[in-house]
Amino acid sequence: MAFIVALPHAAEASPSRASLNGLDGINFFNAAMLAGFGPYVAVYLAEQKWTQENIGFVLTASGLAGLLALMPGGELLDTVRPKRALAALGAIMVAVTALVIGIWPNFPVVFTALVLHGTTGAFLGPAIAAISLGIVGHLAFPEQLGRNQRFASAGSLMATGLMGLIGYLLSYQAMFLIAAALGLPLLVALAAIRPADIDFARSCGAAHPDAPTQRARTTHRCLWKNPAVLTFAAGLFLFQLANAAMLPVVGAALVYDGESRSSLIVAALIILPQIVVALLAPWVGRQAQRWGRRPLLLIGFGALPIRALLFALTADPLFLVGLQLLDGISGVIVGVLTVLVTADLTHGTGRFNLAQGIVGTASGLGAALSTALFGLVAANFDWAATFLSVASVGLLAASIMWLLMPETRPSTEKRFDSSDGRIEQVVVEDWVRATPGRPHLIRRGTITPPPAGLSPGSPAAAATERGHGASGPEGRRR
């Protein structure tokens, strides 16, 4: 007879419902607030009679500021305990920049505002990920990431539609005032999260305070020499290098070809993947726990070169819109698993947020170079050649994931064999959330008494304390 035992180092806290609802809120309103930027900034500044050179300069400066802030921001998140305060500071700064751009659209003010926006917005997303990990713990993190992604996509969709309507009915200036106002419900959602629910050790990927042995925080050098971290960062760089330019190249081609429905088609190309992300994100989080990370990564990375190859075969607008379903699949998988795999690779190191900065910088560099590189290719070659080159880069990214990237799902459960008292490693199929330091011995739906002869004080014996029930999904008797 064999039983599944969740050992103390894997124990996870049970967060309050208020904190979980607050997480939903900050993901929704953060995405909604950030939707007021991006392409709307360029359109608004063009309406204010800015030149294309000045618009490109301030947007590039904002993007570079964001890239440069990612790793210092990650280091700050690994060091500072009050992560709610950091997230609140970032939200306030983004709201202030939206307000300033809407009221004073002159060059020095907008330049300063967008640099501040790029800097604070760069660590706002990682801060939300760190807060999520600190609240739910590593074992529940996959499903929480799926939920985070769903609410973020819903917020982005809602805000994109609302901003477009406001810009049409009122003015582009009003869009930025609304974006600034969305900072208020974001701060309310942050306040709803209880500070006691955010475990600092979990939030930076450190060993849990209740663990019997404490590991020193990993040095920066060890993190940079970690082959799995470097492989993952290289794969994400190539993925974004191929992916980021596809939509701009398609949009520009539609305009140059005189397509009368170009604005509607581009809107559909943007919205359809977001709908797919909102629908599939929780499922991806669950399957990442059941299947492991690697199969999903291969699906997400593999969908990119397939989509690029199909784009190379046709320029029919309706067909292109349908192919954006593949973009949604890639987007939801890469969106959820980028943070999750980073958490896996840094579990117990205390460097989760710095690693987020490393992989985020790699992704951002790929996206920044993508438009320039493939815009140059599109200017000198035809449609098919452009997307065949995109597909080749995407295929290289998928090949790196297939050949070099290991499975990162941790095995955190053991099997107790009562025949000889052995504890052997088994593949994780179910997880259990327990009070820190108090393991659970679980079978489907009940607490299992310890097998006869089990020594007192052992992990399995401690799990059978009377009245100590599970608060998470059930384990499995074998």
Image: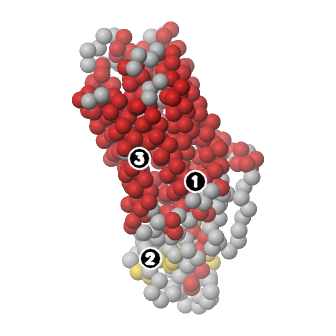
- The residue shown at (49%, 57%) is 132
Outermost front residue: 104
Residue 311: x percent and y percent? Answer: 39, 22
User: In the depicted view, which residue is nearer to us: 296 or 423?
Assistant: 296
Q: Is residue 73 left or right of residue 215?
A: left
Residue 267 quadrant: top left
Outermost top residue: 380
Label 3 SS: helix
- The residue shown at (26%, 19%) is 261
* In this view, 213 is above or below 397: below
- The residue shown at (54%, 61%) is 134
Residue 343 is labelled as: 1
Mark 2 nearby-residue class (10 Å; few <14, some 14–19, many ≥20): many
Q: Is residue 150 left or right of residue 78?
A: left
Give the mark nearer the N terminus: 1 vs 2.
1
Mark 1 nearby-residue class (10 Å; few <14, some 14–19, many ≥20): many
Residue 467: x percent and y percent? Answer: 45, 87
Amino acid type of disc 2? Ala
Residue 188 quadrant: bottom left
Mark 1 and mark 2: Cα distance apart in space:
24 Å
Residue 162 is labelled as: none
Residue 168: x percent and y percent? Answer: 26, 27
Give the mark nearer the N terminus: 3 vs 1.
3
Mark 3 and mark 2: Cα distance apart in space:
37 Å
Residue 183 is labelled as: 3
Q: Would you say residue 374 is visible in this rendering?
A: no
Amino acid type of disc 1? Ala
Label 2 SS: loop
Mark 3 nearby-residue class (10 Å; few <14, some 14–19, many ≥20): many
Residue 470 is labelled as: 2
Q: Would you say residue 380 is visible in this rendering?
A: yes
Mark 3 and mark 1: Cα distance apart in space:
28 Å
